[in-house]
Amino acid sequence: MPRQVDHAARRRQIAEAVFELISEQGTEGATLRLAAARAGVSMGAVQRCFSTKAEMMTFVLEYMNQRVSERVQNRIDASGDPDSAAIMLEQTLIGIVPVDEPSLAETRVWLAFAAQAAVDPALAAIQRRQYADLAALINVLIRAGQGDGDLRADLDPDQEADALITFTDGLNLQILFGRHDSRTALAALEHRLAALRAR
Amino acid sequence: MPRQVDHAARRRQIAEAVFELISEQGTEGATLRLAAARAGVSMGAVQRCFSTKAEMMTFVLEYMNQRVSERVQNRIDASGDPDSAAIMLEQTLIGIVPVDEPSLAETRVWLAFAAQAAVDPALAAIQRRQYADLAALINVLIRAGQGDGDLRADLDPDQEADALITFTDGLNLQILFGRHDSRTALAALEHRLAALRAR
DNA sequence: GACGTTCCGATGCGGTCGTATCGAATCGTA
DNA sequence: TACGATTCGATACGACCGCATCGGAACGTC
């Protein structure tokens, strides 16, 4: 058993490189050669880690989803009052909105994959699962917030969770389009959230 | 001056072909050869109509924007009570949400260009202009609706116009992701619009 | 230290891309 | 009717794509 290499780490390393390429040049920049060069490995290494380009792209998508989830989770953990569902809901949605260059890069990649998913069922399935998880989380938080009396009791949690995701996605788009910056986007989100709070 | 050809018509014909290709295969499908084949012309004809591929893509984007604008305008014109700004506002936003395969195709193309625009300043500028026009229209409608007493007077027209565009964009995304169909999306939009009406 | 397995980097192969070029066909004009 | 400007279709070109192949380097085992 000679020359063992950390396969998983290598895959993440390459995924990170592809991530950067997509964030800079869009999906067109995600070629095997550029990925290898950016990751500092040879093209053969990329081919051994991923049997095909499609597999590489799905891995990158899942890698990105995981990164976003972790970023949001970190924000929730770092928020002051982790016992309040209403605050956790706020922090969750705020955490999705990009505020600096790293998170902006994530959002650009997210949009690139969204466009790809519109014509590629395999990618669409991955994205749908990610959205289902997010919707379930928000749903739980809304119900808990209603239980605490922090959120209006007349809200339909399912409907409101979908509406919040929809609005947040729209905000991300508007930021990428340059029609919002993180400040105005967060203000708009805050305005939206304020309408949910119990009076 | 021999062999004159209707340049503008040919450009539209090719743009329509590219439009179809993008709606089916994403931006990757927008190649000169496929465009020529789909439009039923030779590759040379495409090259004479557009000096470069980038020019072709910007033309297709503007062509698509025009189509969407016309579709929305038609919906406004066809609505029962053209004198009510509040109804015109509703019809405008509803008209943006795709309800059938042709409008779904438009939305897929819109998303493809959105992803492209995130890394291509030239396309981004075109999109930004389109959004500015839409925002101005909605802004006017909101102010008029407030003047008629149909819409809540405490709304900030600028802020609310942006929020409506944001939400509608998010709805389009959710539809493409398969997390909404046109029925539930329109219901969500209607729910959102109801919150704007004067009580 | 020799061996055998596994990994690495490089190169080759069809294919397709955008673009350039060029003779043939076409039509208004003289 | 003959001409010449202009468009047409086709082909050529260099570059890059994803993928396959392969000899040699690297390392655990004996």
Image (cartoon, coloured by chain):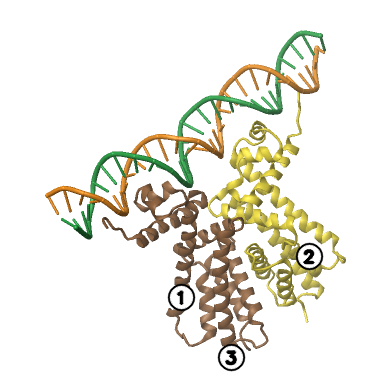
Chain colours: A yellow, B brown, C green, D orange
Q: Are marks 2 and 1 on the same chain?
A: no
Q: Which quadrant: the C terminus of chain B?
A: bottom right
- Using the numbered discs, state the Cα–Cα distance from disc 1 to disc 3 in whole angstroms: 22 Å
Q: Chain of mark 3?
A: B
Q: Is residue A186 left or right of residue B55?
A: right
Q: Is residue A134 above or below residue B132?
A: above
Q: CA distance from mark 2 to mark 3?
A: 37 Å
Above or below residue A88? Residue B143 is below
| Residue found at the very far right of the displayed protein | A80
* Residue at horizontal 59 percent and vertical 61 percent from the top: B179
Q: Position of residue A8 (x, y in %)?
A: 74, 38
Kindly identify which numbered label has been placed on residue A102: none
Near mark 2 (Cα within 10 A), the count class, few <14, some 14-19 or many ≥20, is many
- B138 is higher (above) or lower (below) than B59: below
Using a 10 Å C-alpha cutoff, classify the residue at mark 3 as few (fewer than 14 neighbours), some (14 to 19) or many (20 or more): few
Q: In the displayed structure, would residue A13 be above or below residue B70? A: above
- Residue A91 numbered tag: 2
Residue position for label 3: B147
The residue under label 3 is which amino acid type?
Gly
**Disc with the residue nearer the chain's start (1 vs 3):** 1
* Amino acid residing under circle 1: Gln
Q: Position of residue A130 (x, y in %)?
A: 67, 55
